[in-house]
Image (cartoon, grey):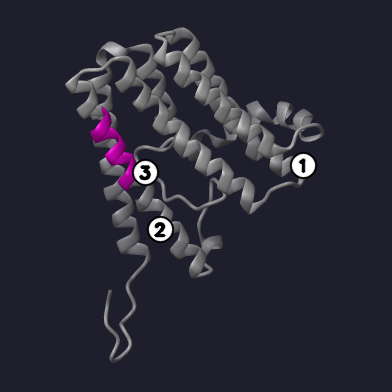
Amino acid sequence: MLDRMLRPVKESVVSPLAVVLARRVHPNTITIGAFAFGVVAFICLLQHEMLLCATFWLLGRLLDGLDGAVARRSGKQSDLGGYLDMLLDVIAYALIPLGMALAFPSPAVFVAVAVLLAAFYVNIASWLYLSALIEKRKRRDEYVATTSLFMPSGLIEGTETIVFYTLFIAFPGIFVVLAYTMAAMTTITVAQRLVWALRTLPVPAAPPGSRAE
């Protein structure tokens, strides 16, 4: 919801550092570094080192915001870089809820983590397939893309996810409430993207003799 609004702010903040790094560091190295910080945050969470966990988590997200800016300034944008960034992000975002379940085991936490990750699973499918359809139709330029793949906007996006995850770490005692709240908001996002698809991707008439799958 806030990603497009905050993107100019983020660009202005990371731009000076991105200019410096573009001369020295490959953007994929930054992507891997961001993931490494996420893994360290996960390990800190398992050890109940919550301050360290939050620190490494936020440092990882900072690097995650830098890789694209460095790629653009160095002329090293690539499909591989976008794919690597997306894949490692998905893993990093799965690690923190998993870490909450392992660090604070209880039936309530297990169920909350399961519901949250299920909502994530559906949400990822809800926009990844839409993005593939837009690429297939060669209509990507009609929309505003915020990453290597087009993502229809929704209530929960990158900014909101970072905020919720930081709250998970800062306030583990209310993790269950926060997880259900985020899962509900993520479900609303899935519904928003379904409405977007119904309005934007009208189904063409099937050719005579064909069978819909």
* Of the pair 94 and 123, the residue shown nearer to us: 94
- The mark lying in front, picked from 1 and 3, is 1
Magenta part of the chain: 113-122
Q: Earlier in the sequence, mark 2 or mark 1?
A: 1
Q: Tell me where residue 52 appears, x and y as whole percent.
A: 50, 10
Residue at (23%, 26%) from the top-left corner? 110
Residue at (29%, 15%) from the top-left corner? 104
Q: Which residue is mark 3?
A: 154
Q: Residue reaching furthest bottom?
A: 208
Tell whether label 2 touches label 3 (CB within 8 Å): no
Residue 74's tag is 1
Q: Tell me where residue 42 appears, x and y as whole percent.
A: 45, 21
Q: How much space separates mark 2 and mark 1, taking CA atoms?
A: 30 Å
Is 115 a magenta residue? yes
Task: Please indicate, yes or no, whether residue 171 appears anywhere in the rendered image.
Answer: yes
On screen, 176 above or below 130?
Answer: above
* Of the pair 4 and 38, the residue shown nearer to us: 38
Q: Which residue is mark 2?
A: 129
Q: Earlier in the sequence, mark 3 or mark 2?
A: 2
- Secondary structure category for the residue under label 3: loop
Residue at (55%, 25%) from the top-left corner? 60
Q: Earlier in the sequence, mark 1 or mark 3?
A: 1
Tell whether label 3 touches label 1 (CB within 8 Å): no
Q: Residue reaching furthest right?
A: 23
Q: Tell me where residue 144 appears, x and y as whole percent.
A: 52, 52
